[in-house]
Image (cartoon, helix red, strand yellow):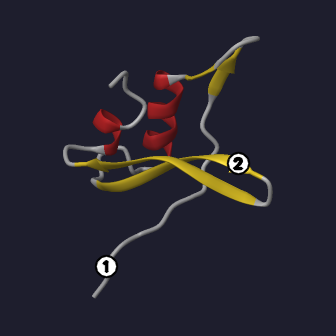
Amino acid sequence: MKLCDIDGPLGVPFSANKRIRLVDGAAGRALLESLKIGAGRGCYVLGIRAGQGYTPIYVGKATKSFAQECFTAH
C-alpha cells in the first residue's frame, strides 16, 4: 500500500527588490501544474535555504488542491 509521494525540494520563483522578496503566485501555480501535482491534495512545507539544509517557515494542508492553496494571498 502506497502511503504518500514526496516531491522536492522545489525552487519557488520570486521577485526581489531592495527590501523584500515576493513569491510570484502565477509562476508558482504554473510550477505545480508542470509537475502534475496542481490538482493533488495533501500537506506541504515552505522553507528557506539555511546553511546546509532548509528551515521550515510554513506548513499547510491542501484540502481542495495544491493549486488553490499554495501561492495564494492568504
Q: Secondary structure at mark 2?
A: strand
Which residue type carries mark 1?
A: Leu
Dot 1 corresponds to which residue?
A: 3
Dot 2 corresponds to which residue?
A: 49
Left or right: 69, with 54 as reference point: left
Q: Is residue 17 above or below residue 40?
A: above
Residue sitting at x 45%, y 42%: 32
Which residue is nearer to you in this view: 34 or 21? 21
Residue extending farthest left:
64
Looking at marks 1 and 2 on the same chain, the residue that comes earlier in the sequence is marked by: 1
Q: Kindly report which numbered mark, 1 or 2, lies closer to the viewer in this rendering.
A: 2
Which residue is nearer to you in this view: 28 or 58? 58
Q: Secondary structure at mark 1?
A: loop
Q: Estimate the x, y position of residue 53 in percent, counting from the top left.
A: 71, 60
Q: Estimate the x, y position of residue 62 in percent, counting from the top left.
A: 27, 47
Q: CA distance from mark 1 to mark 2?
A: 27 Å
Residue sitting at x 32%, y 82%: 2
Residue sitting at x 41%, y 53%: 44
Q: Is residue 46 above or below residue 19?
A: below
